Amino acid sequence: MDTNKRPDDMQRITTSELAQKFIDEQVKDVRAQVGDKKVLLALSGGVDSSVVAALLIKAIGKHLVCVHVNHGLMRKGESEQVVEIFRDQLDANLVYIDATDRFLDKLVGVEDPETKRKIIGGEFIRVFEEKARKLEGIEFLAQGTIYPDIIESDGVKAHHNVGGLPEDMKFDLVEPIKLLYKDEVRVVGRELGLPADMVDRQPFPGPGLGVRCLGEIKRDRLKALRDSDAILREEFAVAGLDKTVWQYFTVVPDFRSTGVRNGKRVFDWPVIIRAVNTVDAMSATVPDIEWTVLKKIASRILAEVDGVCRVLYDLSPKAPATIEWE
Ligand code: XMP
């Protein structure tokens, strides 16, 4: 039997009862697969890895070792939330690595978007690998692979989280949600008791804020990006737009524009608001956001974020624009 193929008669998980049944089955299967061995998981805090973590904590408790790498390109409060939920609330065996300086130092002077992506992805593997080598008795690697990852990779099994580990570090894989669609993963996550803002999160690219702090990543501009993004998310939640808009974030370009502050001429960054609706991210439309909401976001960003004198709303659909700016 092809274990990477969803059986034709597999029922779609839409209710709490079905989620519970799935969880019970997976807990049994995972225990049978790993016995008393240890399992390693790269826990980004995204929906998929968080649901896998919660499921495996239920199945094997402290035999799951979660590693959260903060690459310094996370959104405001994100790494803190991972630690709070998994270490403090779920009592997980969580290793937290703040690798901010390591990543940002590597990115100094790098402007090209694809090179930035490669550096971030490569460094992530190296930080994870170094930690994994120090941990003893790990025999399995858990991954948040979901069914679209398998379908999209055309039958070739996709590594959802940590591809690219060296040959001598190939562990047996534990992929408990690999036959689920995203909406089912969310139902299972809710049933496992994960908070709504974690389970219903919008997609967030692996390179994080790195692809939204355009050009060379500078710490001060990254801070303006993180602070403005936090304001945008807060105000979208207040307006209920977090329930209806698929993805929304801010972007800070690597050029300045003129402004006046306290009667003095300044030369500060613009912040661009990006919001899109889509089904599969292949094409996207721009939602009609109320002016009152946009103006409130703009006035808060201008008042609260250092180094910003202008706020823009991106009206471009995909195609021709992509969702991200680089
Ligand atoms: P684009 O910009 O290509 O984005 O229209 C489509 C979707 O993919 C996400 N995205 C990424 N996700 N690594 C990721 O994990 C990346 O390098 C990356 N680039 C774009 C983007 O956020 C959007 O949801």
Image (cartoon, helix red, strand yellow):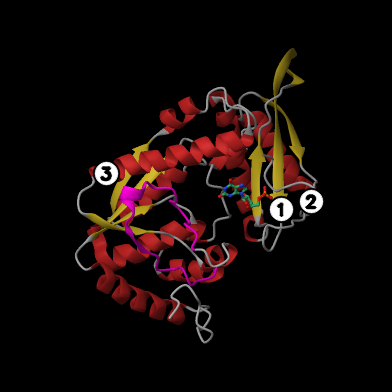
Residue 280 horizontal/vertical position (percent): 67, 62
Gap in Å between the C-alphas at discs 1 and 3?
A: 41 Å
Q: Nearer the viewer, mark 2 or mark 1?
A: 2
- Whether pointer 2 and pointer 1 mark residues with C-beta atoms closer than 8 Å, the reply is yes
Q: Which label sits on residue 133?
A: 3
Q: Is residue 292 left or right of residue 71?
A: right
Q: Residue furthest bottom?
A: 9
Rounded to the nearest angstrom, the CA distance separating label 2 from label 1 is 8 Å
Mark 1 residue's CB less than 8 Å from ligand 1: no
Q: Is residue 16 magenta?
A: no
Name which residue lies at 71% across and 37% down.
272
Tell me the element at label 3. helix
Q: Which mark is residue 276?
A: 1
Where residue 221 sits in the image (x, y, percent)?
A: 59, 27
The residue most toward the front is: 167
> On the image, numbered disc 2 is attached to which residue?
317
- The span shown in magenta is 157-181
Displayed quadrant of residue 99? top left
At label 2, the amino acid type is: Pro
User: Residue at coordinates 19% horizontally, 65% vertically from top-left?
Assistant: 36
Nearest to N terminus: mark 1 or mark 3:
3
Q: Closer to the camera: disc 1 or disc 3? A: 3
Please tell me in which quadrant of the rendered image residue 309 appears: top right
Q: Residues within 10 Å of mark 1 (few under 14, many from 20)?
A: many
